[in-house]
Amino acid sequence: MSSTKNLRKRVLILGGYGTFGSRIAEMLGSESNLHVIVAGHDLFKAELLADRLQQQHSETDTKSRCTFEGLRLDHESASLTVQLKDLDLDLLIHCAGPFQQQDYHVPDACIANSIHYLDIADAASFVSEIETLNQSAEDAGCTVISGASSLPALSSAVIQVLGKPFHKIDDIEINIAPAHRISRGLATVRAGFESLGTELTLLRDGQPVPSYSGGELRKITLGHPVGERQVCNFDVPDLRLIPKLIPEVKNLRFGTGVQPTLLQWGLALSARLARIHRPSTIPDPLPYLARLGHWLAARWPGGSDHGGMQVEITGIAGGAGQRARWQILGLNGDGPWIPAAPAAAMARKLVRGEYSNHGARPCWQLLSLEEILRELEAYSVVTSVEAPGA
């Protein structure tokens, strides 16, 4: 290995040619002295993306520019720990979802090799319970961070900014309405479908209230051109983290939905079907529905290529009841860059040594809103804020 190559930080992205992994790889292409390994089950797809990104960045200084490589690597492999040891990595970014049914096999393998670990998980249990690895990560001298995506990395950064004028926060509501005419991976669709009907807990008037993923179909309104959308409840890390970290909150919920409306109604119906008790001899229909939904979503007419996310909080500011709302809109199909931005921003901090706290934790307010939005400057993404006194 040459001395020039030794100076490069080595970052491996599991699921690196997927919807979000590929975007993170592309964002990190602007980082100098970095070697990005695009990894996944399909070597051809990994090498194809690595070659494209290498050509894309070929005009920059050849000595310091980011370099790319494709690699076949199965994150479920029993020999993952040994394979990672041979790769001499500084950081692994786990994008191979869905995370709802995964254990901590990948972060454990990173800890065993003292490799920093980062993921884009939005599975509530996976992210909120990552702290169970804290002691082993500290002992290994590495950093393990889960949820470096829209939830909870971006949402918590927004809450940090919106909450500054508030003496007391009573209500928090977070909604995400993705665009319809975008490319979406099967893992993303599976994560949504396979969680339908599962129980979750909301806060109402300070009391925990049972609900389920796919319940409470309702309308929300985002800025033009996204407009009115329908969303329903889903379990996300924020529903577990916020009551612990902001205990005064009395009302808390999260909603997401799809376009067109008929597809959203189908999600709500699937959630109800999932809650019907069935004999053990009848297989779970949700994995099959997920594949059908993935096929339909790619072919269903209508909808738009605009999507968005909003965070709204209410509470006491300046001695009176106040409301604050923040929105981010991904226009012209650029919405999928938003969930990728926190991981890219966090990865930069880790490889630059700007974040050096060892241990395992959710990505809750580890990034500033400014750091995340900086990653999105090249894309059709706009934000707005309505705050007390603004």
Image (cartoon, rainbow, N blue to C red):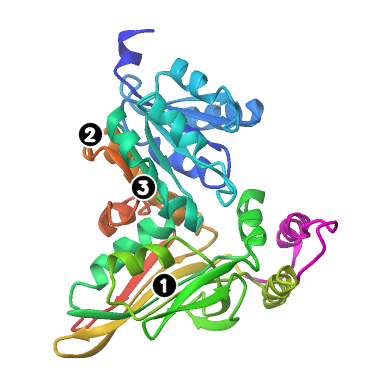
Assign the C terminus to one quadrant of the image. Answer: bottom left
Looking at the image, which is closer to me, 214 or 344?
A: 214
- Along the polypeptide, which appears first: circle 1 or circle 3? 3
Mark 3 Cα within 10 Å, few/some/many (few <14, many 20+)? some
Q: Report how far apart the C-alphas of labels 1 and 3 lie in the structure.
A: 27 Å
What stretch of residues is rendered in magenta?
277-303
Q: Nearer the viewer, mark 2 or mark 3?
A: 3
Task: Name the amino acid type tagged 2.
Answer: Gly
Residue farthest toward the front in the current orientation of the protein: 280
Local SS, label 2: loop
Position of residue 174 measured from the top left corner of the image (x, y, whole percent):
43, 72
In the displayed structure, 386 sits above or below 193; it is below
Does the residue at mark 2 contact the one at mark 3 (Cβ under 8 Å)? no
Task: Name the amino acid type tagged 1.
Answer: Gln
Residue farthest toward the left in the current orientation of the protein: 318
Reading the image, the residue beneath label 3 is: 131
Q: Report how far apart the C-alphas of labels 2 and 3 lie in the structure.
A: 21 Å
Local SS, label 3: helix
Looking at the image, which is closer to me, 326 or 302?
A: 326
Position of residue 267 measured from the top left corner of the image (x, y, whole percent):
69, 71
In the displayed structure, 382 sits above or below 226; it is above
Reading the image, the residue beneath label 2 is: 353
Residue farthest toward the bottom in the current orientation of the protein: 320
Tell me if 195 is positioned left or right of 354 in this view: right
Mark 2 Cα within 10 Å, few/some/many (few <14, many 20+)? few
Q: Which residue corresponds to the image point at 30% horizontal and 68% vertical from the top-left? A: 159
Task: Name the amino acid type tagged 3.
Answer: Glu
Position of residue 63 measured from the top left corner of the image (x, y, whole percent):
32, 19
